[in-house]
Image (cartoon, rainbow, N blue to C red):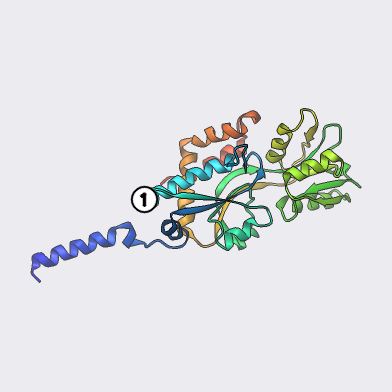
Amino acid sequence: MSARGRILAAAALALLLSSPAAAQDLQGTLKKIKDSGTIAIGYREQSVPFSFRGNDGKPAGYSIDLCSRIVTGVQQQLKLAKLDVKWVPVTPETRIAAVVNGTIDLECGSTTNTLSRQEQVDFSHMTFVDGGSLLIKADRVAAMQDLGGKKIALIPGTTTETAVRGALQKAFVTAQIVPVKDHRDGLAAVESGGADAYASDRVILIGLVVTAKEGQFAIGEQYLSYEPYGFMLRRGDAPFRLAVNRVLSSLYRSREIMQIYARWFGKLGEPGNLLIAMYALHALPE
């Protein structure tokens, strides 16, 4: 081969190796999405205002808005003319398994990032910060120390359950735990008298109160826990996690997140200092 030929061959090889597809072949979830042209998103049907089934039967909420933008970002990264979204309803009992076994690629709900859950799945950047509280009838007491001998409804297997049991123990209070399937059942338990309080994340409880008859329910001032939300994805899939986090960081940097916040939480006023700090800390530069 002539000198000129060797130079051209070397240049062609360098160009090939420098292309994204050759430099790093797609693996894991991104490859699965590109090959199928579909991304499977898990969502909650009753977790208002984060993730729920709207009146039109379609997923809606704060988390859904964030994940819709993630879908667009992944589509652009993979250079797909079209990317179909398969919406899969999940529950607190099925959400982790759905991520692990590949039923869904990303869980977009109201899941708290904990170290024990990180043993099974990975999490995106934080998407919200909340705390556990109690929903009660408007004419009842809400302090934990006043619930001795009372019934507290909650969803089993959640961080709220752990927080409630810990708070009861700390307050030297004995109360009966009433397991419920979802937030709607928790509200119904309090309304019917089957429970004296329903424990869950505070913003979710506010959503329940807003949709109920005015003046019927109240929320206790006491915070029972710290709940940092994130989106679950398969453990060890760094390229897909980066793709998800890149979109979230962009939203936080551009302040578009404030428009999304206002859409779903505007009635609550401006975001608190803790949430603003969370957005700032995760607004990573490119």
* On screen, residue 65 above or below 173: above
Element type at mark 1: loop
Residue 184: where, in percent of width, then height? 74, 43
The N terminus - image quarter: bottom left
Q: Quadrant of residue 101?
A: bottom right
- Is 46 or 264 nearer to us in this picture? 46
- Hey, what amino acid is under mark 1? Lys
Q: Residue furthest bottom?
A: 1
Q: Quadrant of residue 18?
A: bottom left
Left or right placement of residue 157 versus residue 80 in this view: right
- Taking the spot 87% from the left edge, 44% from the top edge, the residue there is 147
- Is 7 or 43 nearer to us in this picture? 43
Left or right placement of residue 250 versus residue 51 in this view: left
Q: Quadrant of residue 103?
A: bottom right
Label 1 crowd (10 A; few <14 / some 14-19 / many >=20): few
Q: Residue furthest right?
A: 149
Q: Residue furthest front?
A: 56
Residue 279: where, in percent of width, then height? 54, 41
* Residue 284 makes an appearance in the image: no
Residue pointed to by mark 1: 79
